[in-house]
Amino acid sequence: MNRQLHGHRVAILAADGVEQDELVAPRRAVEEAGGTTELLSISPGEIQAYRADVVVGDRFPVDRLVGRASVDDYHALILPGGTLGPDRLRTDDHAVAFVRHFMHIGKPVAAIGHAPWMLIEARAVGGRTLTSWPSLRTDIVNAGGVHVNEKVVVDRNLVTSRGPLDLPCFCYALVGKFTQHPQPVGQF
């Protein structure tokens, strides 16, 4: 087993309506690389995942409410997509503040599909190049970002990807980015 993320704790921020594969595949990649993950959300209990926004998927237990989480407790952040989940998250002040703080201090963030809506809401795309689900192009441009149609884009601490078909490339890139960012001394 590859242990390059041993000792790294990664937050995954998601809500009901998350795209299941965009939650499961990155989580598995981090854990296979030796890291640990914690699912954060805006409501306790479980979140309901979907496939393509219409096919009901699995339910996933929430480990912690984002309003009770500290950015200092995590090495990196994963934002899975799906239309419904990120749309719910971007209306929650705690979720937006959590993402904004991650981006502000430069810790690694990986966002796929519709998840860049959270980056837009956190006012964190200005001057950055990123990709997303195609329908977010105008939103990203209007927020001051540059949108490109590529499988994966890495811009400083941010890794973005278009959607489920790009998951192998996205997972590879996020593990690489998370590995490049040294684990803070005295943390975790």
Image (spheres, helix red, strand yellow):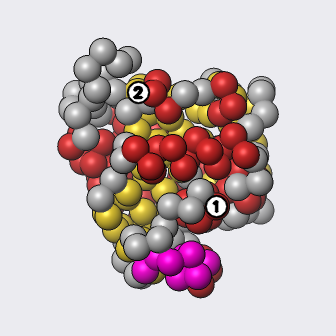
Residue assigned mark 1: 121
Residues at badges 2 and 1 in contact (C-beta under 8 Å)?
Answer: no
Residue 35 highlighted magenta (yes or no): no
Q: Position of residue 134 (x, y in %)?
A: 55, 80
Q: Residues within 10 Å of mark 2 (few under 14, many from 20)?
A: many
Q: Amino acid at mark 1?
A: Glu
The answer to which of 79 and 91 lies nearer the viewer is 91
Residue 141 highlighted magenta (yes or no): yes
For the C terminus, give its image quadrant: top left
In the rendered structure, the answer to whether residue 172 lies left or right of residue 53 reads left
Q: Amino acid at mark 2?
A: Arg
Q: What label sits on residue 173 in the rendered view?
A: none
* Secondary structure found at label 2: strand
Q: Position of residue 50 (x, y in %)?
A: 71, 53
Is residue 153 visible to us here? Answer: yes
* Magenta part of the chain: 139-146
* Secondary structure found at label 1: helix
Residue name at image x 64 percent, y 61 percent: 121
Residue assigned mark 2: 9
Residue name at image x 70 percent, y 63 percent: 83
In the rendered structure, the answer to whether residue 164 lies left or right of residue 16 reads left
Q: Nearer the viewer, mark 2 or mark 1?
A: 1
C-alpha distance separating marks 2 and 1 = 24 Å
